[in-house]
């Protein structure tokens, strides 16, 4: 076929065009493939940088946590030293750490040179730090850089921010009917069951149960010795178990830096655990700074020591900063100023002496003479005729042959005699005398007469309200010879305006209403007059004051308690409706597998945390506050489970929501470390 | 009556049970009007204060049920006349029995009479016999009044400690707690005796 020139030119142009298009496509494909390669390399590098960065932030968290735990709050210089220089960990060779830092931040998130205390919405003090890391690497297409940040949060939680805080196991085993309306936390295991039906033990929807170890409905150690009949029913959770029961990290210590100082294996008695909170430091041994900072003894505004029956007629003299006289010493510290007149007023509120008839043995050694037979055995020889003989022969010839004769015989004869002997005999007698002695009450749980010192809060409160610089903390102890001495808080209806914490190393009895607004008429408190779930726990117009009672063990005595009945049978110790508005911080007993003398070994559970000694049948014990169990009781360790100690009250126990926003005088916080959210810039 | 055994591992000390049997005749001869004490052990289940049933062990005195618990790590036997407790691993024993006296015989005023009675149990052949001053209220539980005596002596060369304690219970009867132990174990044995007695309580009291 023949073509024209014009046609040939068009074909050439078309071919050229196609070649150009093909080249463009190839070029575009080349360019696209090359970019994807670069992007893939970059993404992988950034992932590697991010992974390494997260590891560095975890490293920073660990260093920060240990430093905080050991040395308390850290400033920016200290925290940055944790992750700089030789403290900075190595990274892969192709990476470079541009920056790794830890800095305190304020409430707005701005970096600060010092730690800044902030607050979460209502629960606790919060110290926030920011760990930041920038990493760089190079690769195809240039440099890659990643910056990551993570918040490091120390949350300082007063243990009174829930219904029950327990360092040991949290146990409830077949208690009388209970309704719990508040958070429960244990740093150990939770064993929670009821013996009648699930409805007998209810956690209201606002009650969260958090535990560190394990959770179950099994019987605690020794509990089946007490009662093995029936079934263990799980409790009722109003909002469901899955939403109310959680496993959480440990909340430990009695203040920042305390837990890491604890060591029960060394010889230092000042670092043995949370109980240091109520103990004075033992002189001659190191008192670790963080623990010393948490001791109520060190933090108290007033130290009151009794050493025997108080004699108020003795003068008070000021010596070494303390007013002392008549077996009592009152010392102001931590900015509290105390005059002699104020000291005398305070002493008048502290009583512990009785005149008691005491039987004293008065020996009377007398010489007693008595006739005592003193034997004298002698050998005596004597001639004795011995008859003998025999027959011989037979028939008429039979006759007797007599062979009798004298023989010499020897025998022993007592030739003793009575002699007069003198011995010394005590023929003394008991002589009754009236003596000034320390008052005691019989504690049916401890099975002991407990030397007791009363602190009349109604008497002391006006004085405390006028005491310059007083911080609301009284530490009181009895250094007398008894290990089981106790303080008793009486007449505590109205507390000082700024609140009151009373702490002691021994036992603490609280008699009658506390922080209810009246010292004279318990029935004017609605929860006493008409106990019910919604009854007010104060008289009209009274706002509860910040209040805490802190001791080795806390015993609740009703408004009707009488010392004279303390050793009588339980039916003679009749209680009456009583209301307490306070935090109770006290010791616990661990359950053991077997007790002695018929005791089960079971601790008695949370329901016996405040210890009762009366028959509360038909009576109520209304409580609004928080129970805090931080340490084991060392001095008051009697078992709870005879039938002669108490009959339980109707327990109206509530968490006082005012404690969510209140800081109780002298009560340190337990703490927890949290890794906050990770952000990538 | 036939002694009950509270443990399969119980061993009976003949001497101890014979000693327990002794006071019965004295009581019968001295005062037939005395409130009866029968140490025979009974059991019952009663509702515990928190709700569930728990088992109680008790004996009867003056018509009241005296609840007690078995000491841990001890062999425990009883008959009508008293209890015998043999602490495991210790060289000693504890007897609880009726008293030949009554609470009306004031402990302080009649201390010498009580001592004279208590001294009768000192074994013949004891040497280096020493009696300490009386102790007022060695068992200070439940509002009880008590009076105690302590003898130390050597028996066949072994140093021994014997205590005799008269206790007025709140139900109006008097019991005697006697401990006999090698001197080295005396403190531990006496501690067990005090713990055992401290746990007594009157049901419905």
Image: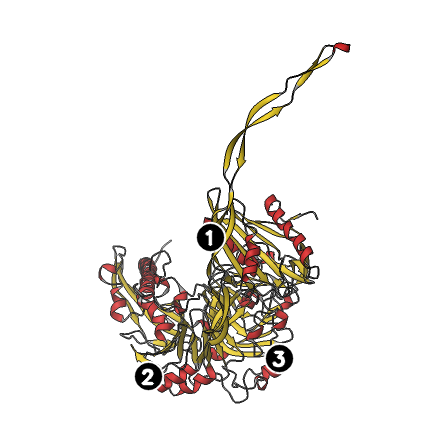
| Residue at the image point whose x is 22% and y is 61% from the top | A85
SS class of the residue under badge 2? loop
Q: Residue furthest bottom?
A: A541
- N-term-proximal mark, 2 vs 3: 2
Q: Can residue A537 be seen in this view?
A: yes
Task: Same chain for labels 3 and 1? Say yes or no.
Answer: yes
Are marks 2 and 3 in one subunit? yes
The disc at residue A422 is 1
Residue A681 versus residue B121: which sits nearer the camera?
B121
Q: Position of residue A208 (x, y in %)?
A: 52, 69
Q: Which residue lies furthest to the right in this view?
A: A395
Residue A437, image x and y in percent? 46, 73
Do the numbered discs 2 and 1 sit on residues whose CB atoms are within 8 Å?
A: no
Residue toward you, A28 or A140: A140
In the visual, does A310 lie left or right of B120? Answer: left
Q: How crowded is mark 2: few (under 14 residues within 10 Å), some or many (20 or more)?
A: some
Q: How far apart are marks 2 and 3 (CA)?
A: 44 Å
So how many labels did they put on this image? 3
- Residue annotated with mark 2: A337
The answer to whether marks 2 and 1 sit on the same chain is yes
Q: What element carries label 1?
A: strand
Up/down of A579 relative to A55, above or below: below
Q: Mark 3 lies on which chain?
A: A
Considering depth in this image, is B81 or A7 the residue closer to the camera?
A: B81
Residue ID for mark 3: A532
Tell me the SS state at disc 3.
loop
Badge 3 vs badge 1, beta-carbon distance below 8 Å: no
């Amino acid at each position: 076929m023949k073509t024209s020139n014009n046609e040939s030119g068009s074909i050439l142009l078309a071919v050229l065009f196609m070649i150009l298009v093909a080249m463009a496509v190839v070029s575009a494909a080349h360019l696209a493939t090359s970019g994807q390669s670069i992007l893939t390399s970059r993404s992988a590098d950034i992932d590697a940088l991010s992974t390494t960065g997260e590891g560095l932030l975890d490293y920073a968290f660990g260093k920060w946590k240990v430093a905080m735990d050991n040395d308390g709050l850290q400033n920016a210089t200290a925290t940055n030293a944790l992750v700089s220089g030789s403290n900075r960990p190595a990274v892969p060779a192709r990476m470079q750490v541009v920056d790794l830092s830890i800095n305190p931040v304020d409430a707005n998130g701005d970096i600060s040179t010092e730690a800044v205390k902030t607050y979460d919405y209502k629960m606790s003090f919060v110290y926030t730090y920011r760990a930041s890391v920038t990493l760089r690497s190079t690769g195809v297409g240039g440099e890659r850089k990643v910056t990551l940040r993570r918040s490091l949060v120390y949350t300082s939680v007063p243990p009174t921010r829930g219904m029950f805080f327990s360092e040991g196991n949290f146990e409830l085993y077949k208690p009388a009917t209970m309704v719990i309306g508040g958070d429960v936390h244990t740093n150990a295991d939770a064993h929670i069951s009821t013996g009648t039906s699930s409805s007998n033990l209810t956690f209201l929807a606002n009650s969260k149960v958090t535990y560190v170890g394990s959770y179950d409905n099994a019987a605690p150690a020794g509990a089946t010795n007490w009662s093995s009949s029936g079934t263990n029913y799980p409790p009722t959770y109003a909002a469901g178990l899955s939403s109310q029961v959680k496993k959480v990290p440990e909340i430990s210590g009695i203040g920042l830096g305390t837990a890491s100082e604890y060591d029960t294996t060394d010889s230092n008695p000042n670092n043995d655990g949370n109980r240091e909170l109520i103990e004075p430091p033992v002189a001659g041994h190191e008192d670790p700074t963080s623990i010393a900072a948490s001791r109520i003894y060190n933090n108290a505004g007033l130290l009151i020591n009794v050493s025997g029956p108080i004699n108020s007629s003795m003068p008070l003299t000021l010596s070494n900063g303390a007013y002392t006289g008549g077996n009592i010493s009152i010392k102001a510290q931590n900015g509290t100023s105390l005059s002699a007149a104020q000291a005398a007023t305070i002493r008048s509120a502290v009583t512990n002496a009785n005149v008691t008839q005491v039987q004293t043995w008065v020996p009377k050694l007398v010489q007693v003479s008595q006739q005592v037979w003193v034997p004298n055995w002698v050998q005596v020889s004597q001639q004795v005729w011995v008859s003998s003989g025999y027959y011989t022969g037979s028939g008429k010839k039979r006759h007797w042959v007599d062979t009798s004769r004298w023989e010499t015989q020897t025998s022993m004869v007592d030739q003793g005699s009575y002699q007069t002997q003198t011995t010394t005999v005590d023929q003394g007698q008991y002589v009754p005398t009236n003596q000034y002695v320390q008052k005691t009450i019989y504690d049916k749980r401890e099975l002991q007469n407990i030397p007791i010192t009363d602190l009349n809060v109604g008497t002391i409160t006006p004085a405390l309200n006028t005491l310059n610089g007083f911080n609301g903390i009284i530490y009181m102890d009895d250094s007398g010879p008894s290990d089981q001495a106790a303080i008793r808080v009486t007449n505590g209806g109205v507390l000082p305006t700024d609140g009151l914490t009373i702490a002691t190393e021994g036992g603490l009895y609280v008699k009658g209403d506390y922080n209810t607004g009246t010292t004279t008429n318990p029935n004017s408190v609605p929860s006493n007059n008409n106990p019910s779930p919604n009854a007010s726990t104060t008289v009209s117009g009274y706002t509860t004051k910040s209040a805490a009672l802190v001791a080795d063990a806390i015993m609740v005595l009703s408004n009707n308690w009488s010392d004279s009945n303390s050793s009588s049978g339980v039916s003679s110790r009749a209680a009456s409706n009583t209301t307490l508005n306070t935090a109770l911080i006290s010791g616990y007993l661990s359950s053991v597998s077997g007790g002695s003398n018929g005791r089960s070994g079971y601790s008695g559970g949370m329901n016996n945390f405040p210890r009762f000694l009366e028959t509360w049948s038909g009576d109520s014990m209304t409580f609004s506050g928080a129970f805090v169990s931080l340490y084991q009781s060392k001095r008051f360790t009697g078992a709870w489970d005879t039938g002669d100690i108490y009959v339980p009250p109707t327990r109206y126990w509530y968490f006082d929501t005012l404690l969510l926003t209140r800081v109780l005088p002298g009560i340190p916080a337990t703490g927890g470390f949290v890794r906050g959210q990770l952000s990538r810039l | 009556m036939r002694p009950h055994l509270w443990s399969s591992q119980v061993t009976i000390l003949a001497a101890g049970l014979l000693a327990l049997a002794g006071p019965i005749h004295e009581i019968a001869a001295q005062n037939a009007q005395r409130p009866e004490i029968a140490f025979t052990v009974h059991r019952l289940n009663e509702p515990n204060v928190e709700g569930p049933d728990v088992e109680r062990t008790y004996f009867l005195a003056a018509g009241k049920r005296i609840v007690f618990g078995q000491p841990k790590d001890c062999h425990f036997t009883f008959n009508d006349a008293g209890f015998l407790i043999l602490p495991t691993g210790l060289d000693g024993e504890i007897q609880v029995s009726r008293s030949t006296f009554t609470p009306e015989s004031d402990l302080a005023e009649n201390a010498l009479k009580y001592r004279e009675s208590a001294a009768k149990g000192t074994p013949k052949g004891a040497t280096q016999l020493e009696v300490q001053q009386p102790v007022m209220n060695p068992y200070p539980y439940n509002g009880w009044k008590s009076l105690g005596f302590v003898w130390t002596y050597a028996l066949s060369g072994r140093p021994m400690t014997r205590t005799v304690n008269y206790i007025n219970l709140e139900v109006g009867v008097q019991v005697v707690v006697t401990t006999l132990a090698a001197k080295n174990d005396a403190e531990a044995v006496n501690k067990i005796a005090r713990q055992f007695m401290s746990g007594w309580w009157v049901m419905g009291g």
